[in-house]
Image (cartoon, rainbow, N blue to C red):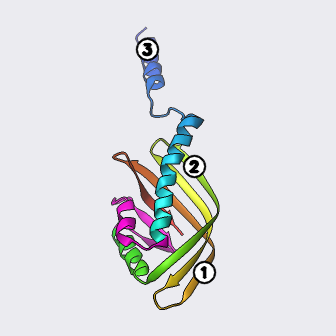
């Protein structure tokens, strides 16, 4: 009898937990609308270089990681790399060819895009990156979406 009650209690406990609750399509759509604001901000901040703004979008966490050109960097090194690059950029123009938002859970989204970037440097040279793949792992922390990881 005790075993049956234990099993029943365990089943009820697990079925009442919201942790594994599937998100409805409506929930996912709302999350994507929120995340699109962050993605638009990232792109605008890169097009009109603003390293301070871009840094504020990164999640200052030991879990943060970037992978650019095959080189891994933690949060501190990523910030240094970003400032070093953007301080030599006059402007950039992005063209998103395709993009995809994958809602992993209520607080985590994976964003991928294929794009083209034209970068006008301060030395008057232009860099064209086409195609340029981008991937961002976005995390909602303290009710704000931040970049936890990005790859280019």
Which is more toward the observer, 6 or 47? Answer: 47
Depth check: give the residue in front, 136 or 94: 94
Measured from the top left, where is residue 39 in percent x and y? 50, 58
**Dot 3: element:** helix
User: Where, quadrant-wise, is the C terminus in this rendering?
Assistant: bottom right
Q: Which of pointers 1 and 3 lies earlier in the amino acid sequence? A: 3
Q: Give the residue drawn at x 41%, y 74%.
A: 82
Residue 1 appears in which quarter of the rendering? top left
Please tell me how crowded label 2 is: few (under 14), some (14-19), or many (20+) other residues with Cα within 10 Å.
few
Q: Position of residue 81 (x, y in %)?
A: 40, 77
Q: Which residues are magenta?
A: 47-75
Q: Nearer the viewer, residue 152 or 114?
A: 114
64 left or right, relative to 91: left
| Mark 2 element type | strand
Quarter holding residue 116: bottom right
Q: Who comes first in sequence, dot 2 or dot 3?
A: 3
For label 3, the residue is 3
Q: From what the image shows, is residue 30 above or below residue 122?
A: above
Q: Please state if 8 lies on the left or on the right of 126 as rendered.
A: left
The secondary element bearing badge 1 is classed as strand
- Dot 2 corresponds to which residue? 102
Q: Is residue 128 above or below residue 99?
A: below
Give the spatial CA distance, label 2 vs label 3: 41 Å
- Quadrant in the picture for residue 50: bottom left
- Dot 1: few (<14), some (14–19), or many (≥20) neighbours within 10 Å? few
Q: Which mark is residue 96?
A: none
Instruction: Say above or below: 130 vs 125.
Output: above
The answer to whether one can see residue 152 in this image is yes
Q: Which label is found at residue 128? A: 1
| Residue drawn at 61 percent across, 54 percent down | 100
């Amino acid at each position: 009898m005790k075993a049956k009650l234990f099993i029943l209690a365990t089943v009820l406990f697990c079925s009442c937990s919201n942790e594994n609750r599937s998100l409805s399509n409506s929930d996912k759509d709302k999350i994507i609308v929120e995340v699109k604001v962050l993605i638009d901000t990232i792109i605008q901040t890169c097009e009109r270089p603003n390293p301070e703004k871009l840094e504020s979008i990164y999640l200052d966490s030991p879990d943060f990681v970037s992978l650019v050109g095959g080189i891994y960097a933690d949060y501190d090194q990523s910030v240094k790399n970003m400032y070093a690059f953007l301080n030599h950029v006059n402007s950039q123009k992005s063209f998103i060819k395709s993009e995809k938002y994958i809602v992993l859970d209520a607080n985590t989204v994976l964003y991928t895009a294929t794009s083209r970037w034209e970068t006008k440097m301060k030395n008057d040279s232009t860099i064209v990156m086409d195609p340029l793949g981008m991937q961002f792992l976005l995390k909602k922390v303290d009710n704000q979406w931040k970049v936890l990881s990005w790859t280019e």
